[in-house]
Image (cartoon, grey):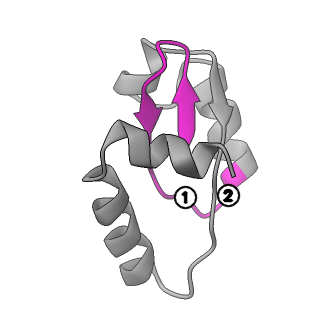
Amino acid sequence: MLLCADDSYYLGHTDDLFKRVAEHQSGIGCAYTSKRYPVKLVWSQEFATREETKAAETQIKGWSKAKKESIDRQ
């Protein structure tokens, strides 16, 4: 989970976390973060399967900002 410069959160999945964060940080990561960088990695987790990853991503995207902030503060 990335914290963007506008104080919003971005969630995604990748096979290479550090490369992907660097892409987002440089403004070439995706349309959403390219308008909101710099970004800061505030949370990540590894999952056994891509299906588990996508399910967790979908679940967290549905959370309130306050709940996402609680992960950020851990």
Cβ–Cβ below 8 Å for labels 1 and 2?
yes
Q: Residue at x 45, y 34 (%)?
A: 9
Q: Residue at x 69, y 52 (%)?
A: 74
Residue 4 is situated, as x and y percent measured from the top left of the image, at 53, 23
| Relative to 27, residue 46 above or below | below
* Mark carried by residue 16: 2
Q: Quadrant of residue 57?
A: bottom left
Query: At label 1, which amino acid type do we have?
Result: Thr
Q: Tag 1's secondary structure?
A: loop
Q: Residue at x 43, y 25 (%)?
A: 8
Is residue 60 found left or right of 29 in the rendered image?
Answer: left
- Check residue 20 for magenta coloring: no
Q: Residue at x 48, y 58 (%)?
A: 13
Is there any visible trace of residue 11 in the rendered image? no
Residue 37 is situated, as x and y percent measured from the top left of the image, at 56, 15
Residue 42 is situated, as x and y percent measured from the top left of the image, at 66, 42
Is there any visible trace of residue 62 in the rendered image? yes
Pick the front one: 56 or 29 = 56
Pick the front one: 29 or 4 = 4
Q: Which residue is mark 1?
A: 14
- Give the overall secondary structure of the magenta segment: loop
Q: Tag 2's secondary structure?
A: loop
Query: At label 2, which amino acid type do we have?
Result: Asp
Q: Residues within 10 Å of mark 1 (few under 14, many from 20)?
A: few
Start-end of magenta stretch: 1-17
| Relative to 57, residue 63 above or below | above
**Residue furthest out toward the right:** 18
Residue 1 is situated, as x and y percent measured from the top left of the image, at 54, 46
| Relative to 19, residue 48 above or below | below
